Image (cartoon, rainbow, N blue to C red):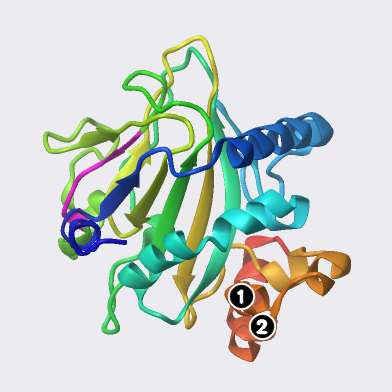
């Protein structure tokens, strides 16, 4: 990544990498996502959460090599390290598809409700555009610079669901990838078109924080057996601290019993 790109990521809180995915990778991801939605039906996304007027998939590393290739991409990881520092790990991989012809939008939020702490930033998200993101099909909105505000939107705004005067819409062609400091105020907007709008989200956190989805317990043994040493590090498979902090969160959330 260039110095200008890294500077923008630090200043604005997000960086757009246009047409980042090669056509064959985009095609493979689209195919696998369509298969998973068909296979999982009403249970799609049950490892994580449901959302109104939205279709979700969760635990995607367990469900296709194409997802592992994406979250381990070296350029993306350079951006993650620029936000969080070198001690990062994958927190979760989800797919979010905004249903057509609806008015549902997310309130502005920080992922995990997190603010930077005494060590600095600790969450970073990536958006992999499976479909084009246009101004009216439910693109992500964000308020540039708010990752440095030290406040959550629900603390600073009367109505985090309302339009913000400084917000921008993150748009791009299918295949574009966005790296976003997840302390940045952001949220999905309403898809007012007649077609779904789909994206994959690879979410990362600092290694002293719990994973959103506890990868070691979610990944099947045969998937873990195929992982390289670097992939095991990225997923925190052999990290004793992660076993403690992520398992506790998973149990409290009802993902593990």
Determine whether 116 is above or below 147 in the image: below
The residue positioned 48% from the left and 12% from the top of the image is 101
Circle number at residue 246 = 1
Most extreme residue toward the right is 222
Cβ atoms under marks 2 and 1 closer than 8 Å: yes
* Magenta extent: 140-146
Give x and y (percent) for residue 207.
49, 80
Residues packed near mark 1 inside 10 Å, few (<14), some (14 to 19) or many (20 plus):
many
Residues packed near mark 2 inside 10 Å, few (<14), some (14 to 19) or many (20 plus):
some
| Residue 243 in which image quadrant | bottom right
Indicate yes or no whether the magenta region holds residue 231. no
Most extreme residue toward the bottom is 240
> Mark 2 sits on what residue?
243
Indicate yes or no whether the magenta region holds residue 145. yes
Locate the C terminus by quadrant: bottom right
Cα distance between the residues tagged 2 and 1: 6 Å
Determine whether 223 is above or below 86 in the image: above
Label 1: element kind: helix
Most extreme residue toward the left is 165
Asked whether, in this view, residue 195 is left or right of residue 236, the answer is: left
Label 2: element kind: helix
């Amino acid at each position: 990544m260039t110095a200008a790109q890294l500077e923008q990521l630090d200043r604005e809180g997000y960086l757009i990498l246009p047409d980042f995915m090669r056509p064959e990778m985009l095609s493979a991801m689209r195919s696998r996502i369509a298969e998973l939605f068909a296979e999982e039906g009403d249970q799609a996304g049950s490892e994580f959460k449901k959302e109104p007027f939205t279709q979700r998939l969760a635990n995607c590393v367990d469900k296709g090599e194409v997802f592992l290739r994406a979250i381990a991409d070296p350029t993306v990881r350079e951006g993650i390290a620029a936000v969080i520092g070198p001690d990062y790990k994958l927190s979760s991989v989800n797919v979010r598809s905004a249903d057509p012809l609806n008015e549902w939008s997310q309130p502005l939020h920080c992922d995990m409700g997190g603010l930077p702490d005494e060590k600095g930033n600790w969450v970073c998200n990536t958006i992999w555009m499976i479909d084009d993101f246009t101004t009216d099909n439910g693109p992500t909105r964000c308020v540039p610079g708010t990752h440095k505000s030290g406040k959550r939107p629900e603390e600073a705004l009367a109505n985090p669901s309302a339009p913000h005067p400084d917000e921008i819409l993150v748009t791009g062609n299918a295949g574009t990838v966005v790296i976003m400091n997840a302390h940045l105020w952001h949220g999905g907007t309403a898809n007012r078109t007649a077609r779904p709008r789909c994206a994959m989200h690879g979410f990362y956190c600092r290694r002293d924080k719990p994973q959103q989805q506890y990868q070691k317990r979610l990944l099947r043994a045969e998937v873990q057996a195929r992982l390289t040493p670097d992939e095991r590090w990225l997923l925190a498979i052999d990290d004793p601290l992660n076993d403690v902090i992520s398992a506790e969160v998973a149990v409290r959330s009802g993902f593990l019993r």
